[in-house]
Image (cartoon, rainbow, N blue to C red):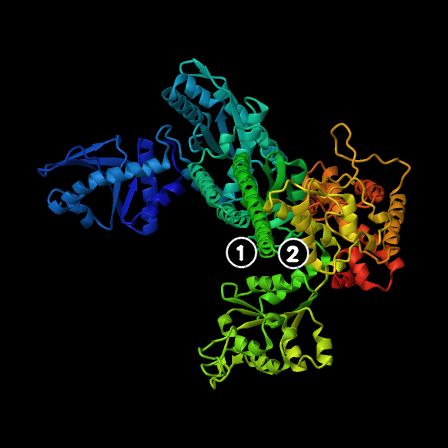
């Protein structure tokens, strides 16, 4: 074994119990050196002498004791019988356990004589012999590699640290035989071990006796050589001399009995800073490893001295297993543990932020970094900081780029993004005590850059070698896949939530449609009415419904009840106009037995039947004045007293009243109590007559045609254009009830499949025929009606568009559209009476249908053309197609010119719905500036919505 330095020998003795010194020896030279150390210790400890006992167990009752006096040794063979033999011989050492016992005087030494040796001491030494030998073998194995008998890596580090502490200049040389894995594979591991022993022996004979030589790990060796020159150039010359000597002694000789030749590479790291300890042991060895990595890349029998410029060179093509398996067992364990922890994080991660935070914390526990940041790409293609940490801070902090990240750091991140590969830089600024090494590792998912990991630190703490670079590459690769997976999961979850919200909205609309399934309408007026009903239905407010006969007041009372919280409670409808005046009080409030002539039985009254539910007083205007006073108390206090009774009963009832009379005029005429009117009129709902909502006429005809065709087993019927014109021009004094009866009669007596004005029994002579804008052509109102008025061309299967002439500008098209809208409005306002046409609804529906066809029925593209959300487009498309299927698609004869302009503008302009609506409103205001009601009907919006549109 190589001789230890005197200081190291002293350390080994001092580290143990001062009364007991154990040291491994294998040669006489070691023993003499050991004796010299002991002599030095003796003088330091002021002891008179030392007794050194070599304990070598041969059996249970025999051991040897050597008494050593510097130049000679007395061998004492002691047997269990107590026979003591003294011999003076040269030292012949075959064992490696020395037990040193200190004594202060000769009296203590005489204890080992024949007469004074206690049996107890003998037994103690005998008992300790086996355990001490075992311990020393284990201790020796921690100092020496069992195969080569060279120092281990740990002992090498201890020796280098001592050299640094003494400010000594030296060079660390790492030696690596090329392709040693292939040698093991070809010759076998036993032969490989033999080659390693040969290399170790050649290293021993290549240098002086006290040279520090180590098996660095696996097939790598390390040699530490001192410098004696004063100039750096002389140091490099000595390095060159050392490597030439090594190359000669190692590479020019064959191994395994001249059957195997091996080339070597050398990596050198110089410790020249003898005035400070800024270059740590870790940095020194790391530099040697990096230099060796570069030497491997350059060829065989190459030596490289470390310098800053070669750091990037060592990252080229290298076996990626080096990222996990190194020549250091501690690093291997650390790397494997780090990889395992990261894989565990990835497997359970559910959020990007949490995974990034855990990853950063784990790296902080492994590498001595100063700053560490993790970036992921934001939607605007900029680096978004997910988590950041600065080592000088004691607690974790999430940092914003503008707060802590410097411009050079961001520049490195941008460089990593542009190159999509590892990048590094050295910040050697004047205000820093040592250079700052910075690295950026990209996150790559499916070939695309999605972010990066940034780390930096001082040269001594973070200077990483190729193996660690490859390890971080592997970790960022795993993180990339995890971040991509979590992003997709988050996107999917968000899309599912949006889809769920959309489905919930559709379900809400469907439920609303089911609740209003008895209300057949498509006009803006009825839509506003229904919205009002929905709001008031959920309250307990008293409602007064007014409207002409046949407008559907009773149907609205049922709707109010179904939408209220009392939907599962009683619904009681009392037709006040059908009850004789003499009986109405008894019918409402009840009576006791004998209250009047003929009152033979007790009657509770109809009101009491509605407890907890809804009470509808239809035709409230028909109640006599003398009953109105008693009704007033009920409406006010919800209390009733039967006729002839004295007990008052409080009822929980929702009150709805309906009438076709103008109660305000009835109050003025003295036929209705004012106080009752105001009590009933808490919320008034006015049902417009059919003539004021012409949009619903054809829709209702279609509905009743279908209903009665099924009911009376008739074939599918269609409405002729002339009948449609007559229906739109008829004033419908009986409103929906009259229309229903006329359609029922027409279906019953129809003989063909087309209904004419005569079938509908409309008074043709009393109808004012409309002008051109009502002259519908080639139109049959049926469920299969197409949108032939929308002309969209198709060419070679591409997107359905009309080719614009290059000479036509968007401005010209808008001017033409303005003229078309002006003509439509003029045609409407010239009629007497004016029949409002929902131009705004037509424009909106046509834009939706045109965009859908132009986009090859792809909703996302169509929504993009119109600059509206896809969910909004789908909802509008559904409504437009429902109107088309319901037979509400007929347009005036000259409407096709307008749709042609819309088709061209959709291709060239954006935000068409909003712009066309503004264009239409401006044209309407030019011709009828003061008629808000008519303007709202033409725009197909409610008056409040119109006011908002005008103000905006």
122, 428: nearer the viewer:
428
Few, some or many residues within 10 Å of mark 2 (<14, 14–19, 20+): few
Which residue position holds label 1?
396
Which image quarter holds the C terminus?
bottom right
State left or right for residue 394 relative to residue 702.
left
Left or right placement of residue 828 versus residue 457 in this view? right
Q: Is 800 or 91 nearer to us in this picture?
A: 800
Residue occupying the far bottom of the picture: 646
Percent from the top left, x then y, of residue 456?
A: 59, 46
The answer to whether residue 812 is above or below residue 728 is: above
The mark found on residue 403 in the picture is: 2
In the rendered image, the residue lying farthest to the front is: 598
The structure residue drawn at horizontal position 50% and vertical position 42%, both measured from the top left corner, is: 281
Depth order, front residue of 96/650: 650
Tag 1 and tag 2, C-beta contact below 8 Å? no
Residue drawn where x is 26% and y is 37% of the image: 97
Please tell me whether mark 2 sits on a helix, a strand or a loop: helix
> Horizontal and vertical percent for residue 337?
43, 41
Q: Position of residue 786 (x, y in %)?
A: 73, 39
Above or below for 611 versus 354: below
Left or right: residue 274 versus residue 431 is left
How far from the left and from the top, in percent, is residue 100? 26, 43
Q: Residue at x 45, y 81 (%)?
A: 593
Disc 1 on helix, strand or loop? loop
Rounded to the nearest whole Å, what is the CA distance between mark 1 and mark 2?
15 Å
Label 1 CA crowd tier, 10 Å (few <14, some 14–19, many 20+): few
């Amino acid at each position: 074994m190589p001789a230890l330095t005197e200081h190291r020998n002293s350390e080994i003795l001092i580290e143990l119990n001062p009364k007991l010194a154990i040291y491994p020896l294998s040669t006489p030279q070691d023993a003499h050196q050991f004796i010299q150390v002991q002599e030095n210790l003796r003088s330091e400890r002021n002891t008179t002498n030392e007794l050194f006992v070599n304990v070598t167990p041969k059996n249970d009752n025999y051991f040897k004791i050597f008494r050593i006096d510097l130049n000679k040794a007395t061998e004492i063979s002691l047997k269990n019988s107590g026979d003591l033999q003294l011999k003076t011989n040269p030292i012949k050492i075959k064992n490696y356990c020395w037990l040193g016992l200190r004594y202060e005087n000769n009296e203590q030494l005489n204890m080992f004589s024949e007469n004074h040796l206690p049996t107890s001491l003998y037994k103690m030494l005998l008992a300790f012999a086996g355990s001490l030998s075992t311990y020393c073998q284990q201790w020796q194995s921690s100092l020496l590699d069992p195969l080569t008998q060279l120092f281990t890596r740990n002992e090498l580090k201890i020796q280098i640290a001592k050299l640094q502490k003494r400010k000594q200049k030296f060079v660390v040389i790492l030696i690596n035989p090329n392709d040693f894995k292939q040698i093991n594979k070809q010759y076998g591991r036993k032969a490989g071990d033999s080659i390693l022993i040969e290399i170790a022996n050649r290293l021993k004979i290549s240098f002086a006796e006290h040279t520090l030589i180590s098996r660095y790990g696996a097939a790598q060796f390390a040699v530490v050589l001192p410098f004696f020159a004063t100039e750096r150039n002389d140091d490099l010359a000595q390095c060159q001399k050392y490597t030439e000597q090594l190359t000669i002694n190692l590479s020019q000789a064959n191994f395994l009995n001249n059957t195997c030749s091996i080339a070597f590479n050398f990596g050198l790291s110089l410790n020249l800073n003898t005035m400070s300890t800024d270059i740590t042991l870790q940095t020194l060895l790391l530099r040697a490893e990096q230099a060796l990595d570069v030497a491997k890349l350059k060829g065989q029998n190459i030596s490289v001295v470390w310098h800053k410029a070669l750091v990037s060179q060592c990252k080229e093509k290298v076996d990626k297993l080096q990222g996990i398996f190194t020549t250091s067992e501690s690093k291997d364990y650390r790397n494997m543990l780090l990889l395992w922890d990261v894989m565990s994080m990835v497997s359970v991660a559910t959020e990007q932020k949490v995974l990034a935070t855990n990853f950063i914390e784990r790296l902080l526990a492994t590498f001595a970094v100063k700053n560490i940041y993790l970036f992921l790409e934001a939607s605007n293609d900029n680096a978004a900081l997910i988590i950041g940490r600065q080592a000088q801070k004691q607690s974790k902090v999430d940092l914003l780029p503008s707060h802590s990240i410097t411009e050079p750091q961001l520049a490195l991140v941008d460089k990593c993004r542009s190159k999509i590969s590892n990048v590094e830089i050295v910040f050697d600024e004047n205000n820093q005590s040592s250079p700052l090494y910075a690295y950026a590792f990209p996150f790559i998912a499916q070939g695309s850059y999605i972010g990066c990991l940034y780390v930096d630190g001082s040269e001594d703490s973070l200077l990483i070698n190729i193996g660690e670079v490859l390890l971080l590459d592997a970790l960022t690769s795993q993180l990339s896949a995890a971040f991509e997976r979590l992003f997709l999961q988050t996107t999917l979850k968000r899309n599912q939530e949006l889809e769920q919200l959309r489905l919930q909205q559709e379900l809400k609309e469907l439920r609303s449609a089911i609740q209003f399934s008895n209300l057949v309408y498509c006009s803006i007026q009825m839509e506003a009415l229904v919205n009002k009903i929905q709001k008031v239905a959920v309250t307990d407010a008293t409602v007064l419904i007014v409207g002409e006969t046949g407008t559907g007041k009773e149907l609205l009372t049922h709707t109010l009840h179904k939408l209220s919280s009392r939907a599962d409670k009683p619904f009681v409808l009392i037709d006040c106009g059908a009850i004789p005046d003499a009986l109405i009080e008894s019918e409402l409030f009840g009576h006791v037995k004998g209250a009047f002539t003929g009152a033979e039985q007790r009657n509770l009254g109809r009101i009491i039947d509605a407890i907890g539910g809804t009470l509808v007083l239809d035709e409230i205007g028909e109640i006599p004045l003398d009953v109105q006073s008693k009704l007033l108390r009920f409406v006010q206090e919800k209390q009733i007293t039967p006729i002839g009774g004295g007990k008052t009963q409080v009822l929980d009832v929702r009150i709805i009243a309906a009438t076709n009379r103008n109660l305000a005029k009835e109050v003025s005429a003295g036929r209705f109590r004012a106080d009752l009117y105001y009590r009933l009129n808490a919320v008034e709902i006015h049902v417009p007559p059919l003539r004021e909502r012409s949009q619903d006429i054809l829709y209702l005809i279609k509905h009743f045609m279908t209903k009665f065709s099924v009911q009376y087993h008739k074939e599918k019927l269609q409405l002729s254009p002339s009948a449609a014109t007559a229906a739109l021009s008829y004033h419908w004094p009986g409103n929906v009830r009259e229309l229903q009866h006329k359609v029922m009669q027409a279906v019953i007596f129809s003989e063909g499949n087309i209904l004419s004005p005569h079938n509908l029994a409309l008074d043709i002579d009393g109808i004012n025929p409309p002008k051109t804008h009502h002259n519908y052509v080639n139109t049959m109102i049926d469920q299969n009606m197409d949108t032939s008025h929308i002309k969209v061309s198709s060419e070679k299967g591409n997107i359905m568009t009309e080719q614009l002439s290059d000479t036509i500008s968007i401005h010209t098209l808008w001017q033409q559209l303005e003229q078309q809208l002006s003509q439509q409005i003029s045609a409407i306002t010239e009629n007497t009476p004016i029949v409002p046409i929902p131009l705004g609804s037509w424009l909106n529906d046509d834009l939706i249908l045109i965009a859908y066809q132009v986009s090859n029925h792809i909703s996302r593209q169509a929504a993009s053309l119109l600059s509206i959300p896809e969910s909004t487009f789908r909802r509008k498309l559904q409504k437009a197609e429902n109107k088309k299927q319901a037979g509400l698609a007929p347009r005036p004869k000259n409407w096709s010119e307008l749709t042609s302009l819309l088709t061209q503008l959709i291709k060239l302009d954006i935000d068409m719905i909003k712009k066309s609506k503004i264009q239409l409103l401006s044209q309407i205001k030019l011709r009828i500036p003061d008629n808000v009601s008519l303007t709202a009907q033409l725009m197909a919006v409610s008056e409040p919505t119109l006011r908002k549109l005008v103000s905006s």
